[in-house]
């Protein structure tokens, strides 16, 4: 539980935090005296020495300042940042102490060349780790940079199962934006989370019956209404059913927006120390569920130096938008003459209007960048309105999930496709604009609405495909177009649930255009998605956006892929046939190398990678509830006999067991006159959650 601590003999004590007194309070547990059981006493104050506070609150998970069940890793959530050298052999040993839930662990961003079975995607690369079981992951840290680890089964990462992972180069230096490489004085790692009012599993359950009325506190003006999603600046829907309670920076945030906006110095926020003219690298990871989060920093320049752990040509921005799964590294230099003790990192959601298009107040989270070598006053003033952004000098926001803001906003967008690779791209053929004659495969996949991928809804197999080669029918449901009308399918049509998978020839150049168009990719129906692919990084070759009207709302879908907004827009290709087979016009010349990228509503993103990592892998939307619904696919690189063989003792029998017929002697007449009667009972085991109204 959050906001609890262990004391002598492992007793748990319930804590609260009071902004009025800036104090952590402990509730009295004496149940014999009803007048005492809810009284409190102070155990720490924000004004206490930092070492004293840390000692008292050593095992307290603050989260949003309320009390909630979460999953922890060695008692922490997020789990500690694992830092390993590039090329090291890494062993991660997991003991599942959950009472009733299986889990897996995925190191997001590490390619694991030749070790596909150590990647952690449940039912594709391993069986889930049962409660009480021990499981080890052994791999090579073959991908430098900022990464993270998280659970990869149902809602576990939203409920706390996540942590940091960094692969460091020897004698690491960073670009300073002036053509030099420097060592930095300090590095910080941020794991951002958009914490919901209810557990992610409860939210997912209530998507099934199309009502969220019981989730209190999302639309404060209309508590009698069923839950309805919000919209971002282009009129498209915020992905995922996720009523927001707090924005967490590592494990610290606050649930009361009014406190955040009026008295941040009285809140126990995440605080990062800096000195004058000190260079720092801040590694920022969006580990959340659904919301895009804009990251601002007051009065300091932010120099972007890496995306998804891969170094890029440095460039300055005023803010960065991150979608779930994305990472950016920024270089910061301390001010020569700071004017206040703390400057704020501002984390802002992108919900601009509600379903009825009434203006919304943005939700914010904060973290402190505190100068430790000067004596300066603390202030509660925070630049939530971004006063440096004007019509004459608009602020640049990197990676908007749309192409442009309406003209009356003081912001402009920089597309993620404009980020350039820092070094020379050695595989020139991979990024070439030409007509490929061989060794090339091109795919068009529609990642539309909130559940489908190309008309299908992914259903995981009941066993690992590698061990069922040639007999996949035993463990999976084949995608059957005679049973599923995928052009008109809804997420409630289970005829379209199947094991969606592809085979890529080893060594081929694979180009995927993931579009977000048709009846599920327009104003009022569309969602921006983040696409993540396991086992490889890809080059972002092009992002195509729709057109927008004078209010910044989606007007027409991108014309490069002809599509009617009244159809599902499946099995479509480039309108310009000359663009087929690799000759795509408008591709980036020096594209960035990513593993997670956004797919804009009404548009598309084209990626390329060389299929050179044989094995079974997974790809999916990183908006968690979309992934759970079925916006995903599996893929195999190489033929079966080219896939690396897992260790001899690898556990792989998961999902299906049919007990054979009983021996004749057990069915003898000694068991009575009913021995010949066969009774078949089917039991479906699932959670049942009640809400007392």
Image: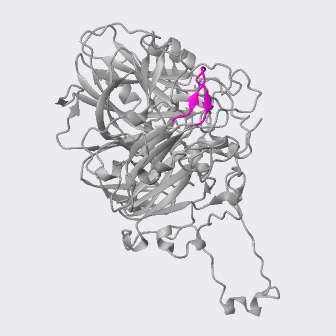
Which of the two residues, 441 or 18, is positioned nearer the viewer here?
Answer: 441
304 w.r.t. 334: above or below: below
Q: Residue 389 at x, y = what percent? A: 44, 13
298 w.r.t. 548: above or below: above
Q: How many marks?
A: 0
Residue at horizontal 53 percent and vertical 22 percent from the top: 405
Which of the two residues, 310 or 173, is positioned nearer the viewer here?
Answer: 310
Which of the two residues, 124 or 155, is positioned nearer the viewer here?
Answer: 124
Residue 313 located within the stretch drawn in magenta:
no
Which of the two residues, 47 or 199, is positioned nearer the viewer here?
Answer: 199
Residue at horizontal 61 percent and vertical 36 percent from the top: 242
Q: Going by the image, does 606 lie left or right of 92?
A: right
Q: Residue 679 at x, y = what percent? A: 78, 77
- Give the residue at the far right of this rendering: 673
Q: Going by the image, does 366 lie left or right of 660?
A: left
Is residue 45 something that shows in the picture?
no
Residue at horizontal 64 percent and vertical 43 percent from the top: 518
**Quarter of the figure that contains the C terminus:** top right
Please report the bounds of the magenta region as a residue range. 545-557
Q: Going by the image, does 131 lie left or right of 116?
A: right
Q: Residue 66 at x, y = what percent? A: 56, 29
Task: Tell me which secondary structure the magenta stretch mostly adopts.
Answer: loop
Q: Quadrant of residue 241?
A: top right
Q: Residue 559 at x, y = what percent? A: 56, 38
Residue 556 located within the stretch drawn in magenta:
yes
Q: Quadrant of residue 328?
A: top left
């Amino acid at each position: 539980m959050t906001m609890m601590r262990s004391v002598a003999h492992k007793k748990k004590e319930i804590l609260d935090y009071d902004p009025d007194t800036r104090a952590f309070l402990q509730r009295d547990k004496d149940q014999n005296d009803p007048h005492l059981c809810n009284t409190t006493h102070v155990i720490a104050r924000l004004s206490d020495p930092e070492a004293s506070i840390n000692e008292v609150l050593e095992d307290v998970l603050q989260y949003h300042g309320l009390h909630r069940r979460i999953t922890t890793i060695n008692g922490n959530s997020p789990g500690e940042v694992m830092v390993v050298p590039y090329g090291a052999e890494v062993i991660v040993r997991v003991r599942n102490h959950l009472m009733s839930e299986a889990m897996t662990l995925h190191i997001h961003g590490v390619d694991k060349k030749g070790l596909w079975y150590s990647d952690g995607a449940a039912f594709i690369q391993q069986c889930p780790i049962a409660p009480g079981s021990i499981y080890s992951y052994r791999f090579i840290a073959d991908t430098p940079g900022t990464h993270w680890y998280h659970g990869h089964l149902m809602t576990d990462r939203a409920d706390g199962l996540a942590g940091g992972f960094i692969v460091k180069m020897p004698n690491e230096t960073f670009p300073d934006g002036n053509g030099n490489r420097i060592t930095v004085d300090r590095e910080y790692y941020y794991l951002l989370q958009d914490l919901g009012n209810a557990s992610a599993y409860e939210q997912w359950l209530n998507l099934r019956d199309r009502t969220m009325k019981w989730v209190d506190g999302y639309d404060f003006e209309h508590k009698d209404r069923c839950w309805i999603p919000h919209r971002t600046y282009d009129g498209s829907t915020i992905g995922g059913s996720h009523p927001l309670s707090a924005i967490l920076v590592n494990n610290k945030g606050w649930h009361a927006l009014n406190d955040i906006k009026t008295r941040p110095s009285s809140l126990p926020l995440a605080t990062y120390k800096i000195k004058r003219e000190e260079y720092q690298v801040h590694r920022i990871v969006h580990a959340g569920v659904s919301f895009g989060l804009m990251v601002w920093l007051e009065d300091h320049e932010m120099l972007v130096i890496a995306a998804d752990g891969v170094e890029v040509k440095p460039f300055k921005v005023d803010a960065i938008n991150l979608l779930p799964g994305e990472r950016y590294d920024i270089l910061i230099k301390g001010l020569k003459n700071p004017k206040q003790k703390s400057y704020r990192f501002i984390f802002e959601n992108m919900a601009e209007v509600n379903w009825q298009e009434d203006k919304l107040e943005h939700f914010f989270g904060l973290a402190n960048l505190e100068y430790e070598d000067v004596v300066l006053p603390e202030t509660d003033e925070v630049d939530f309105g971004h006063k440096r952004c004007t019509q004459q000098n608009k602020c640049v926001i990197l990676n908007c999930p749309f192409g442009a803001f309406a003209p009356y906003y003081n912001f402009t967008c920089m597309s993620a496709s404009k980020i350039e690779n820092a070094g020379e791209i050695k595989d020139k053929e991979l990024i070439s604009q030409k007509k490929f004659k061989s060794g090339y495969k091109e795919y068009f996949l529609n990642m539309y609405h909130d559940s489908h991928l190309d008309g299908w809804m992914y259903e995981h197999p009941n066993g690992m495909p590698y061990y069922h080669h040639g007999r996949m029918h035993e463990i999976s449901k084949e995608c059957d177009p005679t049973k599923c009308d995928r052009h008109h399918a809804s997420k409630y049509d289970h005829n379209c649930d199947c094991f969606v998978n592809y085979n890529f020839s080893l060594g081929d150049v694979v180009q995927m255009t993931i579009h977000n168009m048709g009846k599920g990719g327009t104003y009022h129906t569309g969602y921006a998605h983040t696409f993540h692919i396991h086992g490889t990084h890809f080059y972002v070759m092009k992002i195509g956006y729709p057109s927008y009207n004078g209010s910044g709302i989606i007007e027409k879908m991108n014309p490069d892929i002809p599509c009617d907004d009244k159809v599902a827009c499946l099995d479509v290709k480039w309108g310009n046939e000359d663009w087929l087979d690799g000759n795509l016009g408008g591709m980036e010349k020096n594209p960035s190398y990513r593993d997670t990228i956004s797919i804009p509503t009404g548009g598309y993103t084209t990626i390329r990678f060389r299929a050179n990592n044989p094995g079974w892998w997974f790809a999916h939307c990183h908006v968690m509830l979309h992934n759970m619904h079925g916006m995903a696919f599996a893929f195999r690189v190489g033929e079966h006999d080219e896939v690396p063989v897992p260790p001899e003792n690898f556990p792989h029998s998961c999902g299906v067991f049919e007990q054979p017929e009983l021996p004749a002697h057990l069915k003898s007449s000694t068991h009575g006159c009913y021995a010949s009667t066969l009774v078949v009972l089917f039991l479906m085991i699932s959670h049942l959650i009640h809400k007392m109204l």
